[in-house]
Amino acid sequence: MTVSETTQCYHCGDAVPSAAYEADGHPFCCLGCQSVYRILSNSNLKQYYRYNQHPGKRKGDASARYEYLDEASLADKLIDFRNDKITVVTFYIPSIHCSSCIWLLEHLYKLHPAISVSQSDFLKKQVNITFKHAELTLRGLVELLVDIGYEPKITLQDVIKEGRRFSQKGLVAKIATAGFCFGNSMMLSFPEYFGMGAFEAHYSEFFGWMNLGFSLPVVFYCGRDYFRSAWHSLRRRELNLDVPLALGIAVLFARTAVEVWSGSGPGFADTLCGLVFFLLVGRWIQQRTYHHLSFERDYRSYFPVAVTRLGGEGPKPIPLADIRVGDRLLIRNNEIIPADAILLKGHAAIDFSFVTGESTPVQRVLGEIIYAGGRQTGEAIELEVVKAVSQSYLTRLWNNETVKPHERNFRTFSNTVSRYFTVVLLAIAFSAMTYWFLANDAVRAWGAFTAVLIIACPCALALSSPFTLSAAMSVFDKNRFYIKNTAAIEQLATLDCLVFDKTGTISSPSASRMRFEGKLSPYEWSMIVGVCKNSTHPLSRELVKWAGETMSGCLAVEEYRETAGKGIEALVDGHRIRVGNARFTGAWEKGNGSRVYLSINDEVKGNLLVEQPWRKNLKEVLTELASGRQLHLISGDNDKEKAELSRVFPPQADLLFNKLPTDKMEYIQSLQARGHRVCMFGDGLNDAGALKQATLGIAVSDDINNFSPGCDAILDGRSFVKLPRFFRFAKDAVKVIHMSFGISLTYNLVGLGFAITGTMSPLVAAVLMPLSTVTIIGFTTIATHLYATKNQLVKKQ
Amino acid sequence: MSVIFFLIGCSVFIALIFLAAFFWANKSGQHEDTYTPSIRMLFDDEVEDDGKTQG
């Protein structure tokens, strides 16, 4: 540890290759980190470094441009509030990760006097800033945040606003009201259960009316969603679980009202309040979502907010929606091409890594069409738009708002059961009523009918799915597998066909392996690495990462020149170094794979072959997944790795290459047409259509805060090895649901024994209902945990 | 024993006050971020400065 400590960057903790950057005796890895430190120390904010060691994150080399924030029409979309003095804005900042971040973001007022308040929300990774816009513009504020290493993520599909749309506040208020009524009515019911003397009888009437009063808000405010849902389901000629629940609530209330009114009994107000309270808690558990992840992203969250249009009055930032066919756009280094366009000027080297997962830039010549979604690397280019943003080739794929066909077909287990449950329940209730009518006991007939509906109200049944699945969800979550909702877990258990994308999905883009062919001395290596360090080209960065691990010291680089699409060259210690393609370095083109050629003083020294770095234990993972499931591969790349992949995949698997994004979607459709429940694993925009079409779309991502296309679940690349265990655990979770259904049905049967005789006392209901609920909650929690342990998804304590 | 009516009235009234307080807390967003405040309170006030002491 002592060795690494001395060479770690004071700001970000990365290894410091040489003492090139230094301030106040602290070493820094790059100019970016050093300048952040300078800004903070000048503003007396050095405390930032006291709460955590190396709290910063290395600044990306891509610096976005924020001129568009000066456009009032665009800025208005981003801000929360504005009056004549102040503006309030909320930013989503992905790099928030420690307490130092919170501290710094809440002390922004020290950096700029115009900022009056800034408050951060750690879990949502958001910061809310109030500032005086006369002294600081929105653009100035964003640039200030970028300067200190906290770049806000600004997209059109705003994660913040989306998160706000969905609020549980209403549900929480209902739970509070139901809990309040539950507690009070239980207190008022106790005297009745313990038995009251004859001299206290006049109290029972008072308690009855109080209880009826408490059940009013519970039925008409807290429970109204159940009536609404039951009504909708009946109109669609379906019977979901809300039908017997609503029936139970209604009957409980009717019988309580009648008994209190007529003075014939205490009623079931406490059971009613408790039922609604527990049901709402279950619903709340089920609706838990991730604050910082969005599963509904479309192209808007990926594309920039604005682009530069070249017009009569010079370059001007315009919102994406205003792009018209025929517009001339200026795309600078590291900017994304927002619409299909023809290249008019400049060298285009487009990095389609977000689209295909392939990070090697693609060259385009003048007059060629460039599809939207690529990122320009190198010099600025000019384009003429040929299709509007929403009509572009890739955006069209997931722009159409077609509902997933299977989502309507998919029945969760509780929905399937509830159809039969309701029918059986009504049959029992009516036959009990008929029996007592025939026995000429109308009072008992009414009693038995209502008691059956009350006691068999599937409260525990309704809670077993939410509690099991949300427990399972948090197990997945701890293993870096983020699932959109609880229904997706049930779907996960039913899948029988898995389709994988190649690049970025079963290969990891971050851990490229390189193989060197040739001979170089360590000194020559350090020269090459020194040159490559100056380049932002993905291959150069990979080379530095691959070779740089063993490097120490940095050599001075002169006359550095980067020729887009060809290579880089520079003078190091008087030696001319060239790194690039075969023609650029004067080497013979070697066959397969992407290669980087190296030459020193015009003498070719060898080449580096970039190998596809497969994910860890890929073969074992696939072999395990293949039992009971079909596996297929569909890739947009060429088939040069087919031989290697056919050894990894099972023999009966389809290995498809050179597929267009629409082909992928149609392939999934054809599998579904054959009756398969298909899971698609993808990562890029080109998988978006397939992910959406698949029964379950899983986006594989190495940085979950980065872009991922719309999907049902996001899998962190590091957890790829756990996939077989995830599938097993999902099946186990469904098993737990089945078992808890069994338990709650047993409770219902016991209760029915009391109910059909027509002599059920309110005490039986008041004991049975909470008892079954607590049993179910306890059972599901413990059983899910046990299965998670069995599948090695939780650490043993 | 009529005092029991009064006592129940009191207890429900007090419970209603707490319910109202919860509603207020819910509405004013106190349950939205339950994590950051726990860290915020651990931050020291100004400690080291360039010579000056600050309140």
Image (cartoon, rainbow, N blue to C red):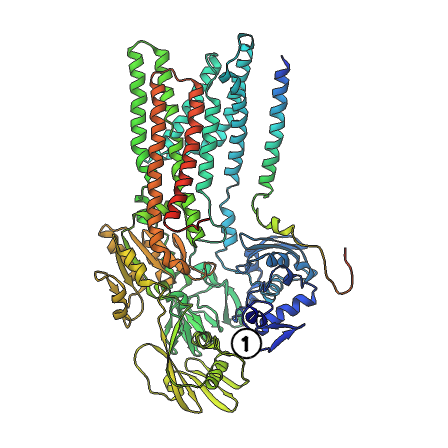
On the picture, is A190 further left or further right than A672? right
Q: Nearer the viewer, residue A443 or A723?
A: A723
| Residue situated in front as seen by the camera: A381 or A229 | A229
Q: Estimate the x, y position of residue A3 in percent, counting from the top left.
A: 55, 72
- Residue A347 position, x and y percent, is 43, 79
- Image quadrant holding the N terminus of chain A, namely bottom right
Q: Could you tell me if residue A444 is visible in this image?
A: yes
Image mark 1: chain: A
- Amino acid type of disc 1? Pro
Q: Residues within 10 Å of mark 1 (few under 14, many from 20)?
A: many
Residue farthest right in this picture: B52
Residue in the picture at 27% in, 58% down: A631
Q: Position of residue A360 (x, y in %)?
A: 39, 73
Residue A656 locus on image (x, y percent): 26, 65
Counting labels gives 1
Above or below A770: residue A549: below
Residue ID for mark 1: A17
